Amino acid sequence: MKKVTIVIPNYNGYQFLETCMNSLRAQTCQDFEVLVVDNASVDESVPYLRENYPEVRVDVMETNLGFAGGVNYGIKQCKTPYVILLNNDTESDPHYVEEMIKAIEKDDRIFSVSSSMISFYKRNLMDDAGDLYTMFGWAVQRGIHQPVEAYRKPKRVFSACAGAAIYRRSLFDEIGIFDEMHFAYLEDIDLGFRANIKGYKNTYAPKAIVYHVGSGTSGSKYNPFKVRLTARNSLYLHYKNLPNLMLLLNAPAFLLGYIIKICFFASMGLHKEYLSGLKEGLKTFRKCKRVKYERKNFKNYLDIEMQMVFGMFAYTFEFLERRVFNKEEK
């Protein structure tokens, strides 16, 4: 049996597949199998993969299950000790799989490891060095648009970015898999949240490198579909994972966070989509399966609160650094 299954969700990603698959063929560690979960693509993805990469298993869904549904299908098929989730718009460094395995095997309390995701087109800049969660209720891509050299050290993070992360498969039975109510966006933060509640760790492995195009499926960083779903899913995150007292204590900061976001998206002409997502979230959040509060996890909730505080300071520092760095670049 192989040690890792690499699950790649795909939806009309034909233009990315050659680069992604060839980089996996070039891995120094070949102790893995590849499963592409195709979300009912209408482009040439499926015939291309079957003709050119016979070693890859391709399972085609009848409908588009979204990121969460697609990767859940893949996780359920896995028998290997570890699962790597990998976006189709990536190119993996030859040592990527090797370094991911090394990182997760350092400690059996590690649930997930986030890789060093570097911009595909600007390879001196980070795309994601693990995700943070802040007091404002914002999920933050740690290191985005920052110099790669500043993120060379392993570190605990709030959540692994599921665009290129490895997971300990056995712990899905305890923590659960991705919440399909999210469909796409913030589902990895939700999963990392649940791991933190149970006392497991999510970490960042700087030597496990992938180059990421970004928004390969949705088409852009900010678009109506993404803005609406992110707004809705942010409400799901709060309700699902925080006990009532923590919700109450954090409500003022969360409210301020929403106000800031509304103003931000108003400047881009996307405030209607953001408000639409919030409205949908308020109507449907009670359908979420809430994490049951257990006293034994009290210290883990305190740790989560501290991570949210740290995440706010880290985000503020990176925001200021990014402004200075970008100014120098110009």
Image: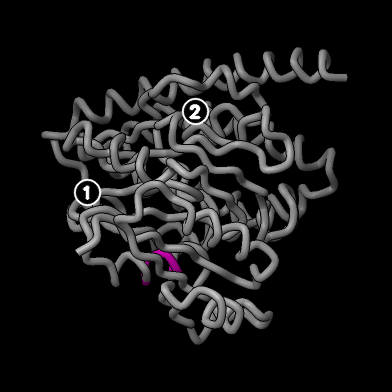
Residue plotted at (48% across, 21% down)? 152
Q: Percent position (x, y) of residue 119?
A: 66, 38
Circle 1 SS class? loop
- Start-end of magenta stretch: 69-73
Disc 2 marks a residue whose amino acid type is Thr
Badge number at residue 134: 2
**Within 10 angstroms of label 2, few (less than 14), some, or many (20 or more) residues?**
many
Q: Horizontal placement of 32 versus 198: left or right? A: right
Q: Nearer the viewer, residue 219 or 149?
A: 149
Q: Horizontal placement of 306 versus 37: left or right? A: left
Q: Percent position (x, y) of residue 307?
A: 39, 24
Q: Which mark is nearer the camera, 1 or 2?
A: 2
Q: Nearer the viewer, residue 127 or 62?
A: 127
Residue plotted at (29% across, 72% down)? 77
Disc 1 marks a residue whose amino acid type is Lys
Give whichever of discs 1 and 2 has the lower sequence position: 2
Whether residue 289 is visible = no
Q: Percent position (x, y) of residue 304?
A: 33, 28
**Which residue is most to the bottom?**
62
Which residue is identified by label 1?
292
> Which image quadrant: the C terminus?
top right
